[in-house]
Amino acid sequence: MPDCTGNLTADILFDCANAPIGGIEQNIVLINKDDIDLSTTTVDLTNRVLVTNLQLKPGKTGYRLEGIKQSNGKAWELVKKENAPDKFKHTFSGVIFNPSTDNKQQADELSKGAKYVVVVEQVWKGADSADAFEILGLKSGLELITMTNSSKENDNMIMFELSSADGFEEVTMPKTLLETDYVATKTAFDSKFVEAEA
């Protein structure tokens, strides 16, 4: 049975060989939350913020959002609860560079009310790159919160934000994804976690 007391169980150390670095890598993967098979997605038995397998349902895939430099970003924050365990609000801010008809169609789909999960690769990757990937919104999903476009700002790009809905935040900070090692996880990420038809 997991420890729900919130008591610390280990030292919190600074690894000076892996000092923190800001930012995420350019490309991210957006996944329709309903396309994730939560029954076969596995969380480490001793660390509830570590996912060891992100499994999509048969025939499903994630979708790449291409970025440049630090155009895309992620954030999370604690949400205090008065009469319940505290939770975490996950936020992803993204940019759609070309307001083409095809890209606008996908942007419009984001506005229909579905929930999404976002997988990012951090610039900071930790020892042996074991902390490179994070999953935002795995349990509750993220919703479109804002979407803007102005011909006089941001070079006419479409700016948007996905976030945990108020009252439906995540039970943990974004989970780390490590499927065996960095290479295996990067391979799954680059293939957009595609799952073959059954």
Image (spheres, helix red, strand yellow):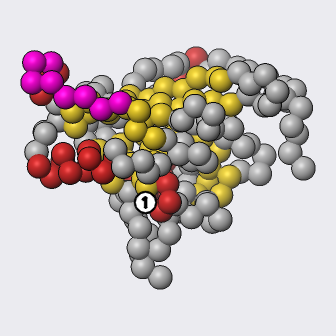
Q: Position of residue 43 (x, y in %)?
A: 68, 52
**Position of residue 53 measured from the top left corner of the image (x, y, whole percent):** 58, 58
Work out whether 161 lies above or below 110.
above
Q: Does the magenta stretch include residue 23?
A: no
Disc 1, SS: loop
Q: Which residue is drawn at 42% across and 79% down?
A: 197
Q: In which quarter of the image is residue 27?
A: top left
Which residue occupies the foreground of this view, 29 or 46? 29
Out of 42 and 145, give the one closest to the viewer.
Answer: 145
Residue interval drawn in magenta: 146-153
> Is 83 situated left or right of 25 in this image?
right
The residue at which mark 1 appears reads as 193
> Percent x, y for residue 155?
11, 24
Quadrant in the rendering for residue 14: top right
Q: Identify the residue at horizontal 72%, vertical 43% (top origin).
A: 48
Task: Specify the amino acid type for callout 1.
Answer: Phe
* Mark 1 burial class by Cα count in 10 Å: few <14, some 14-19, many 20+: many
Q: Where is residue 87 in the image (x, y as percent from the top left)?
A: 68, 31
Asked where in the image residue 149 lies, by quadrant, the reply is top left
Would residue 193 be visible to someone looking at this image? yes
Q: In this view, does 18 lie above or below 34?
A: above
Relative to 197, say whether 39 is above or below.
Answer: above
Q: In the depicted view, which residue is nearer to us: 180 or 143? A: 143
Residue 127 in sight: no
